[in-house]
Amino acid sequence: MDNIFIVDDSTDHIRIDKYLNELLPDQSRSYIQKLLKDGHILVNNSIIKPNYKVKADDRIQIDIPEPIEANIEAENIPLDIIYEDNDVLIVNKPKEMVVHPAPGNYSGTLVNALMYHCKDSLSNINGVLRPGIVHRIDKNTTGCLIVCKNDQSHNFIADQLSEHSINRIYVGIVCGVLKDDEGTIDAPIGRNKRDRKLMSVNEDGKRAITHYKVLKRFRDYSLVQFKLETGRTHQIRVHMAHINHPLLGDDQYGRQKCKFNLTGQCLHAKTIGFIHPSTKEYVEFEVDEPEYFKHLLDILEE
């Protein structure tokens, strides 16, 4: 679907993503930035950078791709649904479940389960492999995840994620005893230059901010609450490893062999709060730590 706009004098020198966001209220700013990145937006028949500022008489042509039907099989996999309405679904993701399909792993994911449960009621903005998925958590991280059931809701939630206004609180067990009761880690995260599958703190990365608070100390470990101000890939895991307190069980960023029988990092997305797409009121959901997490805390107490 093509849209063509001519810039007038009153909107001269406005960033193009902001300009288009005002003209296309049904599309999120993050989606517009994706269209710019993928070359679906032309200015005077040329591809431009996302930070381009429009000029009077610019001719902007937008090609919004038609949705592609997902060739993913719906699977009858049980879901722990915390909340559901016509716009969003909050699911408690279990450990060892991948959020969306990827090459070599097209079954057993949260998306396969959602397609069975929701049928055709899932947003399609994030592409054919990620229907309904507006954000994700790692395979071995448990807890709250928002799923969007239509494009309007997806755009509304995506804008909140982009503005860092969604309240996301995690709890985790880290190696070592943290000295300070609370603190903030403000360190940029980008691709690890030696291993592109991993992330690391490096000067070429994007700004990442994690606030932490110690809930309890054990002899060799600490129970910690994390509040995300940004949402970079593996953010909590990378930041805690960076300050030499990696998450217990983290087999990618941890520096010591875990003496407990764990599968991946001990991290749980406990709370998520956001402005609801339809009611425009703040809603918040919380889910208890999984049984393995509680059992581990009992062991550490002893």
Image: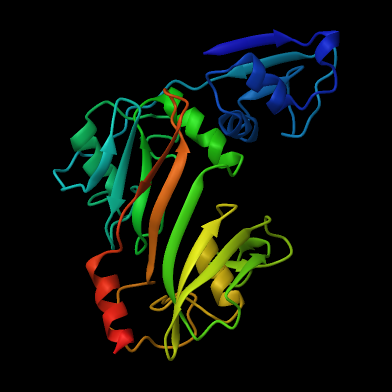
Please tell me in which quadrant of the rendered image residue 3 appears: top right
Where residue 175 sits: x, y (%)?
A: 46, 83
Is 290 left, or right, of 125 in this rendering? left
Say which residue appears at 55% left-offset and 73% top-offset: 240
Q: Residue at x 63, y 59 (%)?
A: 209
In the rendered image, residue 225, in percent from the top left (x then y), is placed at 47, 66
Q: Residue 257 appears at what percent x and percent y?
A: 40, 88
Q: Residue 36 placed where, x, y %?
A: 65, 30
Work out whether residue 158 or residue 176 is closer to the camera in this orientation and state it: 176
- Identify the image quadrant of residue 182: bottom right
Residue drawn at x 30%, y 63% is 289
Residue 58 seen: yes
The answer to whether residue 147 is left or right of residue 253 is: left
Q: How many numbered discs sit on the rendered protein?
A: 0
Q: Is residue 233 left or right of residue 94?
A: right
Q: Quadrant of the C terminus?
A: bottom left
Closer to the camera in the image, 55 or 299:
299
Q: How is the image coloured?
A: rainbow
Please, is residue 12 above or below residue 148 in the view?
A: above
123 or 166: nearer the viewer: 166
Residue located 47% across and 80% down the image:
254
Figure quadrant of residue 218: bottom left
Q: In front: 196, or 97?
A: 97
Q: Quick check: 115 left or right of 27?
A: left
